[in-house]
């Protein structure tokens, strides 16, 4: 995520660190929460899971 990487950038200009954790790839049939940006652009917010 660009914003997170920018926030984690060291003040001396060194390499960024990314401590994010990622879920497995989405696959056909997964239910997701989306946000529509325009007629043709969407952002996947999160994967919906049952507990």
Image: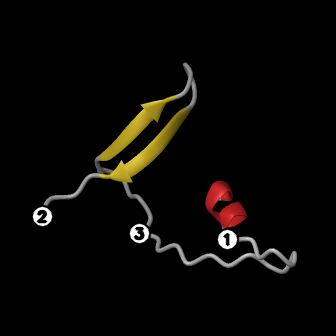
Horizontal side, residue 40 vs residue 48: left or right: right
Please state, as top left, top right, bottom left or bottom right, where the C terminus lies in the image: bottom left
Q: Secondary structure at mark 2?
A: loop
Callouts 3 and 1 close, C-beta under 8 Å: no
**37 lies above or below 44:** above
| Residue located at (80% from left, 79% from top) | 15
Q: How is the image coloured?
A: secondary structure
Mark sitting on residue 20: none
Furthest-top residue in this view: 39
Mark sitting on residue 8: 1
Callouts 2 and 1 close, C-beta under 8 Å: no
For disc 3, the marked residue is 23
CA neighbours of label 3 inside 10 A, class few (<14), some (14 to 19), many (20+): few
Q: Nearer the viewer, residue 26 or 34?
A: 34
Question: Could you give the CA–CA distance between mark 2 and mark 1, rounded to whole angstroms?
Answer: 32 Å
CA neighbours of label 2 inside 10 A, class few (<14), some (14 to 19), many (20+): few
Q: Nearer the viewer, residue 32 or 8?
A: 8
Please state, as top left, top right, bottom left or bottom right, where the N terminus lies in the image: bottom right
Mark closer to the observer (3, 1) = 1
Q: Within the image, what quadrant is residue 5 found in?
A: bottom right
In the image, residue 48 lies at what x, y percent? Answer: 26, 52
Question: Could you give the CA–CA distance between mark 3 and mark 1, rounded to whole angstroms?
Answer: 21 Å
For disc 2, the marked residue is 51
Horizontal side, residue 11 vs residue 35: left or right: right
Furthest-left residue in this view: 51
In the image, residue 16 lies at what x, y percent? Answer: 74, 75
**6 lies above or below 14:** above
Which mark sits nearer the N-terminus, 3 or 1?
1
| Residue located at (22% from left, 58% from top) | 49
| Residue located at (62% from left, 76% from top) | 18
Which mark sits nearer the N-terminus, 2 or 3?
3
């Amino acid at each position: 995520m660009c914003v997170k990487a920018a926030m984690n950038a060291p003040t001396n200009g060194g390499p960024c660190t990314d401590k994010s954790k990622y879920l497995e790839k989405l696959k056909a049939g997964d239910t997701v929460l989306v946000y529509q940006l325009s007629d043709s652009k969407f952002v996947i917010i999160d994967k919906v899971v049952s507990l």
